[in-house]
Amino acid sequence: MAKVSLVTGGAGFIGSHVIDSLIQAGHKVVSLDDMSGGFPDNVNPQAISVHGSITDHALVDHLFEKHQFKYVYHLAAYAAENLSHFIKRFNYTNNLIGSINLINASINHGVDCFVFTSSIAVYGANQLPMNEEQIPQPEDPYGIAKLAVERDLHVSHEVSKLDYVVFRPHNVYGERQNIGDRYRNVIGIFMNQIMQGQSLSVFGDGGQSRAFSHVGDVAPLIARAPFTAGARNQVFNVGADTPCTVKRLAEMVCEVMGAPCNIRHLEARKEVVHAYASHDKVRRVFGVNGEISLREGLERMAAWAKQHGPRQSSLFKDVEVMKQMPLSWKNEILAQRAA
């Protein structure tokens, strides 16, 4: 009998790659996505695609009743850490309450394992390299919501015996990323700007550093988590080891896109300056070694981006707080509202 899995955010970037891995492993897959950041053609045609939101608990309960999922892979989220300060209600509704709808349904319908993509945003600043034994100290509402879901999964295992695996990926990039989102995914933003003949937007001096992780190193591990000995009821960092500054990243993106490197420095924003993680635990449990280099990953994504062309960027319509918002964002939103 085929293993039936639900993938939320299945039309999105990482979720669509997880679906590919699951189908290759023989799963029957249902994708649930509200298409706010995903695209229908991302979804593997062998999956059942449902257009809807995890915040709709009636829909969630209906899908669990209809399909009797054995595994849940929860990747639906709006992962804009810096913007989350200004969209708190939206952030907590989608990233926390939506997750609780899924956890409730998983407990009620006897799901065997719940796989959750959290984020290294739960760590906050000044804990380098970030490792799973550290006490999380998130500095933005996005990280706070992710940590709350992690804690609820822990309690749900203790009380209701729901097995789980939590991954904390970071700065994932690659083919199928929504390069039209101007608030997150810096590599996609840079490639989209280049294809539109624009300068690359860098906040501050570009000295911020991140370890950028190709989706090919992340999605397959997420897919096989319930079937990996020692993975259940554990938390894992997953991604690349080597940090790179945003300024150097901009130069590399220009190189692989074959474009001159014109950078436009914007006002610095409140963010964690340096973020990179230890992956000793995930390597020990999952038995993985090596990673796709940043150069190779950028070349793969550049080829995909050129084939698909630029995407029109849109402003986030429902900003709730304007105070202390980066001026570049604030001025764009104010101009839109005045139009």
Image (cartoon, rainbow, N blue to C red):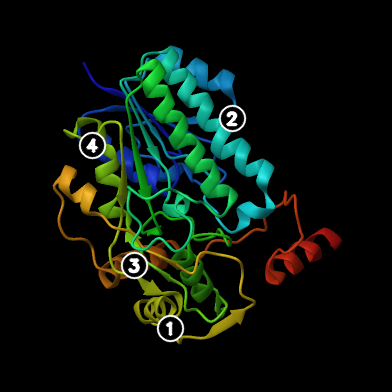
Tell me if label 4 and label 1 are in contact, CB under 8 Å: no
Which element carries disc 1, helix, strand or loop? loop
Q: What amino acid type should be assigned to the residue bearing mark 2?
A: Thr
Q: Which residue is mark 3?
A: 303
Which element carries disc 2, helix, strand or loop? loop
Mark earlier in primary sequence (4, 1): 4
Q: What amino acid type should be assigned to the residue bearing mark 4?
A: Arg
Q: Residue 61 at what x, y percent from top left?
A: 51, 17
Mark earlier in primary sequence (3, 1): 1
Q: Is residue 297 above or below residue 202?
A: above
**Category of crowding for the residue at label 4, using alpha-carbon neighbours closer than 10 angstroms: few (below 14), some (14–19), many (at least 20):** some
Q: Quarter of the image holding residue 85?
A: bottom right
Q: Which residue is mark 1?
A: 259
Q: Which residue is mark 4?
A: 224
Q: Is residue 78 visible?
A: no
Mark earlier in primary sequence (3, 2): 2
Mark earlier in primary sequence (4, 2): 2
Residue in front for this viewpoint, 274 or 223: 274
